[in-house]
């Protein structure tokens, strides 16, 4: 690794589902995997328990951004799901990018299905940025990009 580089400086994330770019997002949550552990006690051995690996579960991923021209792609994705045009689970690629647009890291997720989308809330008495959030479930990570 180049000691002069700062890989922690990722400032935004690109999201592509089945080759369809959904644009860039400024916040990501839930990119995680958890392995359940089953503890088993052996009869007669009072001082030791065996940890047996169990199932792996994956958290739902949430990505958030200020609304932009690309914001129309997400409701269109849900419309395709509701109309039956999109009948299979897809693959998503999330790429962390620096401010200069250079990739820092990428994750490929299998069997992705959008779970929820929340659009912006507008108020004339507030000066907050209008944001949208997309949440999707997946069945795990795929190697490579």
Image (spheres, rainbow, N blue to C red):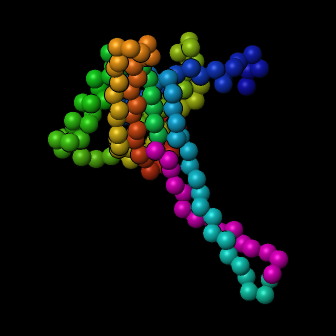
The residue closer to the viewer here, 63 or 88, is 63
**For the point 80% across and 83% down, which residue is it?**
45
Place of residue 137 in the rendered image (x, y in percent of width and height, measured from the top left): 41, 46
The relative height of residue 46 versus residue 59 in the rendered view (above or below) is: below
Horizontal and vertical percent position of residue 117: 34, 35
What is the chief secondary structure element of the magenta stretch? strand
Identify the image quadrant of residue 119: top left
Rendered position, 88 above or below 22: below
The magenta region covers: 46-60
Q: Is residue 64 within the magenta segment? A: no
Q: Position of residue 120 (x, y in %)?
A: 35, 24
Quarter of the image holding residue 124? top left
In the image: residue 19, left or right of residue 3: left
Please give the name of the residue rendered at 45% of the width and 31% of the height, measured from the top-left corner: 63
Is 3 left or right of 117, judged from the image as shown? right
| Residue at 35% over, 39% down | 116
- Residue under the image location 74 percent in, 20 percent down: 2
Where is 125 relative to 134, above or below? above
Q: Residue furthest right?
A: 47
């Amino acid at each position: 690794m180049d000691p002069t580089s700062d890989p922690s400086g990722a400032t935004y994330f690109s999201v592509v589902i089945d080759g369809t770019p959904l644009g860039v997002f400024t916040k990501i949550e839930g990119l995680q995997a958890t392995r359940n552990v089953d503890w088993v006690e052996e009869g007669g051995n009072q001082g030791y328990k065996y940890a047996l690996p169990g199932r792996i579960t994956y958290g739902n991923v949430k990505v958030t951004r200020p609304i932009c021209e690309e914001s129309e792609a997400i409701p269109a994705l849900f419309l395709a799901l509701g109309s039956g045009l999109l009948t299979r689970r897809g693959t998503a690629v999330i790429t962390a990018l620096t401010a200069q647009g250079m990739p820092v890291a990428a994750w490929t997720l299998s069997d992705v299905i959008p779970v929820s989308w929340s659009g912006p809330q507008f108020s004339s008495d507030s000066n907050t940025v209008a944001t949208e959030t997309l949440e999707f479930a997946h069945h795990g990570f795929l190697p490579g990009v």
